[in-house]
Image: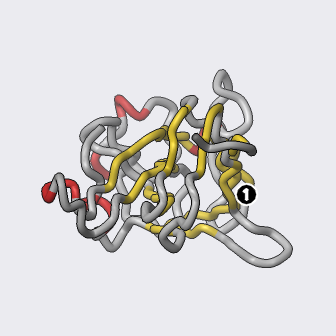
């Protein structure tokens, strides 16, 4: 998968990252993102990525130093948060739950690597642009429907956004 360093450095991408791992960590199965999010628009996209961040220095492969290896990623268009067959507008400013099932992953994070999660609200040009305004069909959105919006991910002790990683316990060998 492509190196994600360029995305991690963008100001519109939220990044969470662990400390370097002391032990191997095996992840196998379907990760699930549970976001509590709001937008100033009436539609929004939520892109989630799980990434293996390599150590800053990899002596036998210098080009891999700091490499951000995307393992699993997907997008959820907010209008489909409840039912993919019945799009609904988002109430601007309202904190809503979003559940995003990511593609299955089977990966061993090695000691010295980090687990990173990136959250962003666009994946253009891989995915079409969301106008941030609810329209019946995004493919026919008029230019005035494309507005600047502010997306927020909420994280409080009572209502935490999170990713459920399918960690495999036991011998990591």
At 32% across and 55% down in the image, what residue appears?
Answer: 68
Q: Is residue 16 visible?
A: no
Quadrant including the N terminus? top left
Mark 1 lies on residue:
96
Q: Is residue 47 above or below residue 159?
A: above
Indicate the quadrant where residue 104 lies: top right
User: Does residue 158 appear to the left or right of 152 in the view shown?
Assistant: right
Instruction: Check the image and tell me how it is coloured.
Output: secondary structure
At 54% across and 30% down in the image, what residue appears?
Answer: 103
Crowding at dot 1, Cα within 10 Å, few <14 / some 14-19 / many 20+, comes out as: some
Q: Where's residue 18, x and y in %?
A: 53, 69
User: Does residue 40 appear to the left or right of 140 in the view shown?
Assistant: right
Q: Is residue 53 above or below residue 103?
A: below
Quadrant including the C terminus? top right
Q: Residue furthest right?
A: 158
Q: Where's residue 69, x and y in %?
A: 34, 48
Depth check: give the residue in front, 88 or 72.
Answer: 72
Q: Residue furthest bottom?
A: 157
């Amino acid at each position: 998968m492509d190196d994600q360093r360029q995305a991690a450095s963008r100001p519109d991408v939220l990044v969470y990252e662990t400390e370097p791992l002391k032990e191997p960590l095996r992840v196998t199965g379907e990760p699930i993102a549970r976001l509590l999010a709001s937008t100033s628009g009436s539609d929004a996209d939520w892109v989630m990525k799980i990434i293996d961040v390599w150590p800053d220095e990899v002596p036998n492969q210098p080009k891999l130093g700091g490499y951000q290896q995307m393992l699993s990623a997907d997008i959820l268009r907010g209008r489909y948060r409840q039912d993919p067959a019945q799009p609904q507008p988002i109430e601007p400013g309202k904190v809503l739950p979003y559940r995003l099932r990511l593609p299955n992953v089977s990966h061993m994070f090695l000691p010295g690597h980090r687990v990173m999660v990136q959250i962003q609200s666009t994946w253009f040009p891989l995915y079409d642009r969301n106008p941030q305004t609810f329209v019946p069909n995004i493919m026919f959105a008029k230019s005035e429907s494309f507005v600047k919006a502010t997306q927020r991910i909420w994280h409080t002790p009572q209502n935490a956004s999170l990713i459920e990683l399918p960690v495999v316990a036991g011998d990591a060998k």
